[in-house]
Structure formats: structure tokens, C-alpha cells
Amino acid sequence: MSDQTILVTGASGFLASHILLQLLEQGYAVRGSVRNAAKGDHIREVLQSHGADTSRLGFVELDLTSDAGWDAAMDGVDYLLHTASPFVTTSPKDPDEIIKPAVEGTRRALNAALRSNVNRIVLTSSMVAACHGHEKNRTTPYTEADWTNPSGKDVTPYILSKTLAEQEAWSIMEAANRREDLTVINPSFILGPLLEQDIGTSGAIIKRLMKGELPGCPRIYFSIADVRDAAELHLLAIHDPATFGHRVFAAGPSIEFVEVAKTLAEAFPAYAKKIPTRRLPDFVVRLVAMFDGDVKTAAMNLGRQHEMDKSLLEPLLGRPLIDTSEAIRSMGQSLIDLGQV
């Protein structure tokens, strides 16, 4: 049992729910931020259904776009894990719909944490904050020194929101002369076991594959992280000096989308006939992208692979990453168990 209190923002998210579960298993007192109290009650029930002791779990109502409640939420907090940020697959008509809450929410969270003099801050960013807007044929891994070029043709509002929000975090910490008190976790595409019926964006993509709602697989590549690994890295970053002042890429090897489909088809034969395991021609993807916002991002990234520097990962975890195929299979099994497919 720990006497330390950790605030986790965006507590209802896929990754955040796994972070909460692991924190409670390790005996921390945990405070989760939600946009309304009813959501907190739901999260508590979900965690209890997975064996968590929620007696040391509480919730606070916070909004990324409002100043209300941030200072009170930080009172008595030892560590901040800021995971809250908008995540979409279709770009909004007004980019500020996603950029503004991401950047301003980061600013509110970190400034409130600094005013409360928390010990350390762990921020959830994304690998997309490093690897876009560069040469299309780059083969060398992206490192923590790399930043996405905001003017790149493949930079969507979501990618820009993650880039600007993370840069804002580093600027705030440097201005406070506390750079070493920040660690940023930059996950790739997160898969793994779902804890509840709210399957999130990544769950929705796998669901579409398993329900046969896609005509085929665009020639795009995913670097996949298992949610359990990504959550554990957040916990390790609280205390491990190797992470202090660094960006940590939580990313497995880059694989083609069609391999995700083939893994699901092999793992779940009853669904194999529905799962598209053929590669769509590039011209078809570009044509569909003219009418489907969900496909537009894929069309911009046809053939592009982003390999990330993983030098910190296994030393931090003390073991290999969970295999990509296991992350895919466990999410597929979760969708079946939850009756989603």
C-alpha cells in the first residue's frame, strides 16, 4: 500500500483504464478525471469487474477547455499522469476542434501540477508527434530528437494536435526549470484486451475488420503497442530515472495492415470469411478517399513505414514487448467476448 496519490486525467480512455487498473493493483491512491460524475461511477464498476480494489479510487470533474477545478484536483497529488486528449479518425472541418483542447488541456494540467508542486509528470503523447512531415522514403528509426514537421502534407489536425501539445508540455517544464521532472510516453497504435463495451477508436477499427465492413486493406503500416505494455511504461516512468526528461516510444515493429487482418482471420476461423485479407490497389484507396474522410488519412500514408527507436523499452520493462500478434488477438477476443462482433 502506497501513501502516494496519482491523478490520471482522461480516466475513461482505453489506455487510461489499464493505467488505473495497474495503479490500483500496486496499491496507489488514485484520482481520475472525468467530464461528469456518472462516468466515474461507470469506470469504478468496470475496474471492479476486473478484480480491482477501488476503495482508494476517487474521481474529479475536469474539462480540457475550462479552468474550473484544476487546482483543487491537484491538491495533495504527488504525481500527474496526463493522458487526456481528443482522438479521432476523421479530421474535423475546423482543426481547432481537436488542436485547441489538446494544447490548452495540456497547459491547464501541467501548470496546475506545477502550482501544486507535484513530484513528477508523465504525459501521454504519440509517436505521430515525431514521425510525420519527413522524407517519404526514410528508413532510419525516429528518435526522441525528431519532431513532426507541422507543414508536412501528411500532417492531419490530429497529428498536429499531438505534436503541438507535447511541445507545449516541454516548453512549460523548461520554463519552470523542471524539464527532468517530465517523461513523455509516445505510444503507437494501441491494441490489446478491452475492459468494457466502450471500445474506443482502435477497437472500432478492429471491429470493422472482423465484421467485414472494409472491402480490403489499404497498403498502410502500423506500429502496434499492447495496451498493457503502454500502461506499464507510464507506471515505470513515475520513478525510473532512465526516463526523466525523455520521450519513450511505446511501439512495436511496423507491420502492414493486411497482416493485422490475416492474424485475425487465422486466430478466429469463424470470422475468417468476413475479414478482408486482400490488399486494395493504391488507386482505389485514393479514389475512395475523395469521398470518405476516414480513408483520406490512409491515402496520405500509402506505403509509408515509421520505425521508432526502441532502445529504452525492453530495459525499462525488464522483458520483451508483448508480441504484436498477441495484442491483435487479445483485442479480437475481447470484441467477441463483449458481443461486439
Image (cartoon, grey):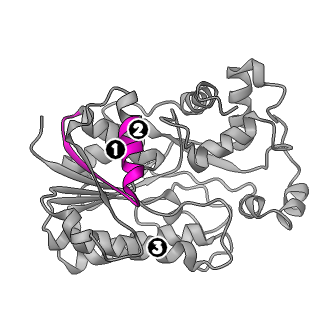
Q: In this view, does 14 lie to the left or right of 177?
A: right
Q: Residue 101 carries which label?
A: 3
| Residue 138 visible to the viewer | yes
Task: Please indicate, yes or no, whether residue 315 appears anywhere in the rendered image.
Answer: no
Q: Is residue 43 magenta?
A: yes
**Region rendered in magenta:** 26-45
Label 2 and label 1: CA atoms lie apart by 6 Å
Assess whether mark 1 and mark 2 are in contact (beta carbons under 8 angstroms). yes
Quadrant in which residue 245 is drawn: bottom left
Residue at mark 1: 233
SS of the residue at dot 2? helix
Mark before the other along the chain sequence, 2 or 3: 3
Residue occupying the far left of the picture: 3
Observer-nearest of 97 and 302:
97
Q: What residue type is labelled 1?
A: Leu
The Cα–Cα distance between marks 3 and 1, rounded to whole angstroms, is: 25 Å
Residue at the spot x=60%, y=46% of the render?
202
